[in-house]
Amino acid sequence: FLSLVSYSFSPFSILSPSHLSPPLSFPSAADIISTVEFNHTGELLATGDKGGRVVIFQREPECKTEPYSQGEYNVYSTFQSHEPEFDYLKSLEIEEKINKIRWLPQQNAAHFLLSTNDKTIKLWKVSERDKRPEGYNLKDEEGRIKDLSTVTSLQVPVLKPMDLMVEVSPRRVFANAHTYHVNSISVNSDHETYMSADDLRINLWHLGITDRSFNIVDIKPVNMEDLTEVITAAEFHPHHCNLLVYSSSKGTLRLCDMREAALCDKHSKLFEEPEDPSNRSFFSEIISSVSDVKFSHSGRYLLTRDYLTAKVWDLNMENKPLEIYQVHDYLRSKLCSLYENDCIFDKFECAWNGSDSVIMTGAYNNFFRMFDRNTKRDVTLEASRESSKPRAVLKPRRVCQGGKRRKDDISVDSLDFTKKILHTAWHPTENIIAIAATNNLYIFQDKFN
């Protein structure tokens, strides 16, 4: 299967000199990573945290003396994306936490990315500068305007080389369109529009227009007491700009076609798995809620994650998933205690590899799971400083429920539910993955890639 090599670093304690790095077991709440996203080439990797910061990592060029080694990712830029706000009309605090980051396809030398907290989406431009102009006629070296009477001759300004500087500047702010918390943003394949989704509505934006958006999905009932489900995630189709999918807390997926009507309340397809009455319990509705949905790179399949399983759906088959993968089925007997400590409401993300043949998702105890769709083999790996020495091959981990235990097996009762892998990302073409574990970012690469 995947033989993965690891190296890890903790970006936020390094990049926040204003406060000392907290102890590993008690990270500051602001340092906890809340989203991870590769750009379209995989050369850049962005993370957002609960303190409203975005850190961008850039992949170093491959070393010529070691042709089989991949370039490592080092800090490229860091900036404050969102600040805490207060809604005076509703007496609500708006957190600065970054909920999602999405890169725009690169059109020129600069990179653009969208970041969002609960209410406001921002478009950022990331560019490099390695030359500075010198020889102004009307300004002195400090930038002050000269007295025109002292200008006696004209000179041609020249560009002089300087140390490389990465500049991050805000280009657009898309605000005041969401009453509820934004949980998803997705850039359309037309490269001109994107959508943002909250609990009850999905809005369509043009990247160049900030003062208005079009509401394309609205599931808010006339009477809020009739509310039975909320939108949990939404994504555009990778190739067809008219198609989008959104998931719900009831475990359903709705595929919408924007060509059919301006308001996509009536879906084109409904993907829903019939419930087995024998498995019904008090927790059935909670654990069936879909926390993440992702189109495959081919656009043919959908990958979803609920609390206990990951599922692959075929766009041409609505009545049941094509494949079901048990992520941590050993937790079924512990749902009561997981409900009491609120872990049952954790929202795990999922990811495809570049060829859509392997899927990945997180679990507890800093474990993450990979499933090979062709061989049906699966593996549990751990993201931790102790087991992630540079260039060491990760050992598969195994959780056991009673009975005989092997030497390295971990008992279900000894799992640490405070250590959870919620956010993961896979390089678009290579076997390189990014795993966010609390305030640490781990990057693993395939040894034989």
Image: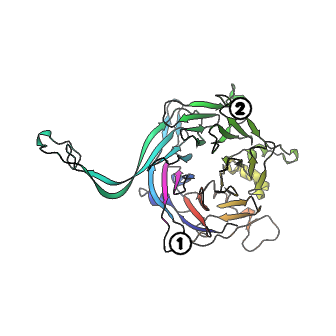
Q: Is residue 136 visible?
A: yes
Name the quarter where the C terminus is drawn: bottom right
Q: Which residue is mark 2?
A: 227
Is-magenta flag for residue 351? no
Q: Residue at x 76, y 62 (%)?
A: 375
Q: Which residue is mark 1?
A: 67
Q: Which of the two marks, 2 or 1, is nearer to us in this view?
A: 1
Quarter of the figure with residue 364:
bottom right
Rendered position, 66 above or below 269:
below
Q: Residue at x 82, y 46 (%)?
A: 281
| Chain part drawn in magenta | 41-64
Horizontal and vertical percent for residue 28? 52, 55
Q: Secondary structure at mark 1?
A: loop
Q: The disc labelled 1 sits on which kind of residue?
A: Pro
Pick the front one: 194 or 422: 194
Is-magenta flag for residue 49? yes
Asked whether the beta carbons under mark 2 and mark 1 sit within 8 Å of each other, the answer is no
Q: Secondary structure at mark 2?
A: loop
Between marks 2 and 1, how big is the CA–CA gap?
57 Å
Q: Is residue 20 visible?
A: no
Horizontal and vertical percent for residue 327? 74, 57
- The dot on residue 264 is none
Q: Residue furthest top?
A: 222
Q: Decide which of tag 2 and tag 1 comes sooner along the chain.
A: 1
Quarter of the figure with residue 203:
top right
Q: Residue at x 75, y 47 (%)?
A: 314
Rendered position, 274 above or below 33:
above
Pick the front one: 411 or 425: 425
Q: Looking at the image, what colour scheme do you see? A: rainbow
Name the quarter where the N terminus is drawn: bottom right
Q: Is residue 291 left or right of residue 75?
A: right
Within 10 Å of the Cα at label 2, are there few (<14), some (14-19), or many (20+) other Cα atoms? few
